[in-house]
Image: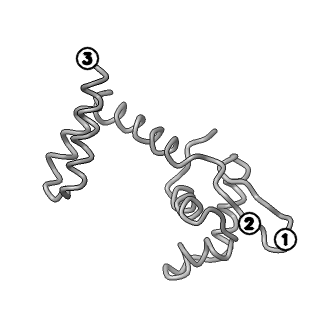
Amino acid sequence: MSKPTESELAILHVLWDRGSATVREVYEALYRDEGGGYTTALKLLQIMHGKGLVERDDAQRAHVFRAAVNKQRTQKRFLSDLVQRVFDGSPSQLVLQVLGGRPEATREELDQIRALLDRLDEEQT
């Protein structure tokens, strides 16, 4: 399965959030305020369907699309690629860079990070 482009990722986010959407709904969510055309949304969805990124239900007059790829798997794939290309394959360098440059992490986010680190530490012992 091919890696989604930035435009395709934007559409996938709409579909992940909504579960499914028509071309009109994707257009309104992403392009209406930016001046993009309805045909842009339609063409991208057709391309994505051909790539296997979305599934199309054409039982009704307006085709309904839903994501054919899992959000978490897609995120992991992009993150793995980023770690390899930018951080020489070191996930810890990525985490240190993100946390070092983001002092506005919320208490909840820090608690989640601590819980994950604790769980990973327990698995190591």
For disc 3, the marked residue is 125
Q: Which residue was labeled with disc 1? A: 60
Q: Residues within 10 Å of mark 2 (few under 14, many from 20)?
A: some
- In the foreground, 48 or 95: 95
Q: Quadrant of residue 14?
A: bottom right
Q: Quadrant of residue 117?
A: top left
Q: Position of residue 7 (x, y in %)?
A: 53, 60
Whole-angstrom CA distance, mark 2 to mark 1, is 8 Å
For the N terminus, the quadrant is top right
Ranked by sequence position, the earlier of labels 3 and 2 is 2
| Residue 110: assigned label | none
Secondary structure, mark 1, is loop
In x, y percent, where is residue 59? 86, 65
- Mark closer to the chain start, 1 or 3: 1
Q: Residue at x 58, y 66 (%)?
A: 18
Image position, residue 22 (x, y; %): 70, 71
Q: Which of the numbered marks, if any, corresponds to residue 64?
A: 2
- Side (left or right) of 54 relative to 123: right
The kind of secondary structure element at disc 3 is loop
Which quarter of the image is occupied by the C terminus?
top left
Furthest-top residue in this view? 125
Q: Is residue 94 above or below residue 46?
A: above
Question: Which mark is nearer the camera, 1 or 3?
Answer: 3
Q: Residues within 10 Å of mark 3 (few under 14, many from 20)?
A: few
Residue drawn at (48%, 38%) of the image = 77
Query: Marks 2 and 1: CB-CB under 8 Å?
Result: yes
Give left or right: position of 46 versus 69.
right
Dot 2: element? strand
Observer-side mark, 3 or 2, equals 3
